Amino acid sequence: MEMLRADNLAVSRGGMPVLEGLSFTLAAGQVLVLRGPNGSGKTTLLRTLAGLQPPLAGTVRCADDAIAYAAHADGLKVTLTVRENLHFWAGVYGGADIAPALAQFNLESLSERLAGSLSAGQKRRLGLARLMVTGRTIWALDEPTVSLDTASVALFAAAVRAHVASGGAAVIATHIDLGLESDVLDVAPFRANGSTVHNDFDSGSGVEFDGGFL
Amino acid sequence: MIRLFTRDLVLAVRAGGGFGLGLAFFLIVSVLVPFGVGPENELLGRIAPGILWLGALLACLLSLDRIFALDFEDGSLDLLATAPVPMEAVVLMKALAHWVTTGLPLVIAAPVLGVLLQLQGSAYGWLVLSLLIGTPALSVIGTFGAALTVGLKRGGLLMSLLVLPLYVPTLIFGAEAVRRGAAGAENAVPLLLLAGISLGAVALLPFAAAAAIRMNLR
């Protein structure tokens, strides 16, 4: 079953086109891994899919409210506990039970800790646990494994596997091998004419990059 | 939506949340004015409505840049934008939380500080009433200003410049209502205009603010 279709998509970042002519489909049970060097437009593509910015050209077709987006920033409040953070997002998305998400990402023993006192990898696990309480079918993930250790990457891979096995799908921009059965979409050949890849910023350092253009 | 409101309240009262900041500022301004103006009770009593309204307005302004900036920095705003909650509702809840944590304490504190400024006895009721009607407009207009400047590094000053002119009508009618009330004159007109500004701002500005946030998140 096709869940998402991108037709002849062109996306821009800070007014500059970065990708064009991109077409792909995503079916239920599929994991699509986006590959490409830093600055090649993976983050921009994911933000476009998530509806945070309109495409320059082309269309993205998917069901309303199907995509859960996870960016580099985890959207955590440092003065709330792990449980409160997750509980808040569960409430926003309609009140799913947070216990399975805590269990999946091995956060139960941390649930009463303030998010501000967590390590970077623990924060990331909490950020990813948020995906499970959204109840959304398509996960759009931007470098989800940053600062995760090997064991946590395995936890994450297991979560994605369970998600797609239950009829979901995922688009993941990542540089590492997650050990998942996945299709790879290399975005580099779709780079827009005239755009250049800078090595001095990571494709994902979104906040700084936006700031530079404002 | 209620979750967002309660979360903002909890965040405001936890460490670094800024609850009480506006209130403390209001207190400082009201305490300092008599030192600057001198101990002339009659003069103080005459300018007290204006000073209290101005103090409340500036105290409100002080906490505006936190409304969206923190959520933008930690990525929550991106996630809220993709959540099944309309951005207009997010804006409205944020404005409501701002009012409850900033505007409402100011309304409650104002009569106490009125004593320091020799506010006339007949004016206390009108002061509380006018602030109660007017501070929601301050919060909503301020939320709009915060939405316009979200994503700008250190956009607080620019936001103040954008928001202060929009605060002018609220200040004029708010202070005028108290002044007329204190003098025993007819003050229904400024109060009604104040209510009109608040209702108009609450009805219209969330849409403008939501549009501004969507633009700024691109």
Image (cartoon, grey):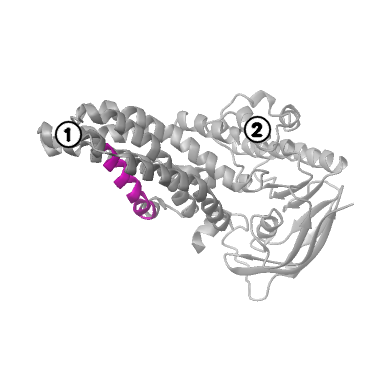
**Disc 1 is attached to a residue of which chain?**
B
What is the spatial separation of the Cα atoms under label 2 and label 1, in whole angstroms?
Answer: 52 Å
The residue identified by callout 1 is: B45
Q: Is residue B214 above or below residue B25?
A: below
**Disc 2 is attached to a residue of which chain?**
A
Residue A89 or residue B96, whichever sits in front:
B96
Q: Which of labels 2 and 1 is toward the front?
A: 1
Taking the spot 74% from the left edge, 40% from the top edge, the residue there is A153
Q: Is residue B183 above or below residue B115?
A: below
Q: Residue B187: name its quadrant.
A: top left
Taking the spot 72% from the left edge, 33% from the top edge, the residue there is A105
Lateral position of residue B165 relative to residue B118, left or right: right
- Under mark 2, the amino acid is Leu
The residue identified by callout 2 is: A86
- Under mark 1, the amino acid is Gly
Q: Residue B84: name its quadrant.
A: top right
Q: Quadrant where the C terminus of chain B lies?
A: bottom right
Q: What stretch of residues is rendered in magenta?
A: B161-178
Residue found farthest to the right: A1
Lateral position of residue B202 relative to residue A187, left or right: left
Q: Position of residue A195 (x, y in %)?
A: 63, 72
Taking the spot 78% from the left edge, 46% from the top edge, the residue there is A178
